[in-house]
Amino acid sequence: MGLSLCAAVGQQRLRTLGRDIAAVTTPLALCFALCAPAGAETLRAHYALSLMGLSIGSAYASGVVDPQTYRVEISMRTTGLANLINNARGAASASGGLTLAGPSPASYANTTSNSDETRTVRMSLAGNAVRTVDVRPMPWDAEARIPVTDSAKRHIVDPVSALIMRVPPGERLTGPSACNRTISVFDGVTRFDVELAYAGDHTAQTRGYAGPVTVCSARYTPIAGHRPDSSSTRYMANNHDISVWLAPLPDARVVVPIHIAIGTAAGRLVIDASEFEINQRRADSRR
């Protein structure tokens, strides 16, 4: 799942917060676009970001999805107190096909900028494997990072596609079947796994949805592309304070996040889908 949540914490965590937020909110936008029972659907969504209860930014998403393909675009920016530390902006997009097993991405692009630098990632994929990837500029400490092997670039999804979670036919859309899974993610630089485990049930209410959600705990496991001596990576790998709430979409038989909370050394980071609008465009809508 696109938990590039799993980034630096503490003071350095704050300086790179904008880039991390972009990686988190992009997959969220895609998830809400996936309730397409027929024809095509369009999505417009707004996300609120807060740290220690203080607003630090917002994200806007738009997308189109039909039963076989998807494409989503997102933009984000920090606001308020976060801009006193680092003015950050980002934009990302992903497209690909949908299968019974989940997303099969074809392309992914992400550009983030803060007070220090602008980084662009472009990636093409096929069969859930990376074909080409271009990162500019590469991280300054690239030589100190664990190399990402070719095998680590197979059986993966990009961060935008990471939160498309299909529930197998015949299984309930709430409860353990909604959570229990491991998602392998490659963001162009780092390769990591996110393991979700059932933690209980809850009731959520936001503009556009009110009803049951499944609460999952999440664990982050770094695989490659990270520094073995990184204290922030160790912090996130040992972090037991990550939770995700998944709301069921019965027609599409998917579950989607409406709330993510992450404990960090800088405080509690919360990402909420404060509102979203999904419109169906059926094949006969123009007759």
Image (cartoon, grey):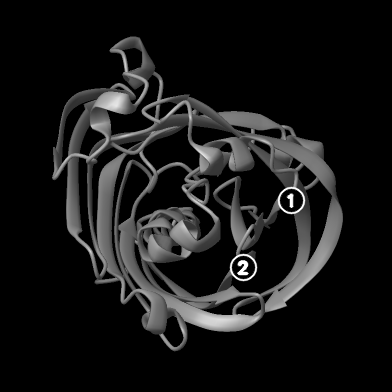
Q: Position of residue 36 (x, y in %)?
A: 45, 55
Residue at screen point 48% across, 58% down? 13
Q: Amino acid at mark 1?
A: Asp
Q: Considering only vertical position in the picture, is 172 above or below 205?
A: above
- The image quadrant of residue 187 is top left
Residue at position x 37%, y 82% in the image: 83
Q: Is residue 174 above or below residue 82?
A: above
Residue 173 appears in the picture as rendered: no
Which of the 4 image quadrants contains residue 248? bottom right
Q: Find out whether the residues at labels 2 and 1 contact each other: C-beta distance under 8 Å.
A: no
Residue at (34, 51) in percent of width and height: 66
Instruction: Name the disc covering residue 270, or none.
Output: 2
State the residue position of label 1. 241
Query: What is the secondary structure assignment of the residue under circle 2?
Result: strand
Dot 2 or dot 1: first in sequence order is 1
- Which residue type does callout 2 highlight? Val
Q: Nearer the viewer, residue 246 or 185?
A: 185
Q: Could one spot residue 83 in this view of the protein?
A: yes
Pick the front one: 284 or 257: 257
- Horizontal relation, residue 109 to residue 165: left or right: left
Question: Quick one: quadrant of the C terminus?
Answer: bottom left
Where residue 24 sits in the image (x, y, percent)?
46, 56
**Most distant residue in the bottom direction:** 80
Where 128 sits versus 124, above or below? above
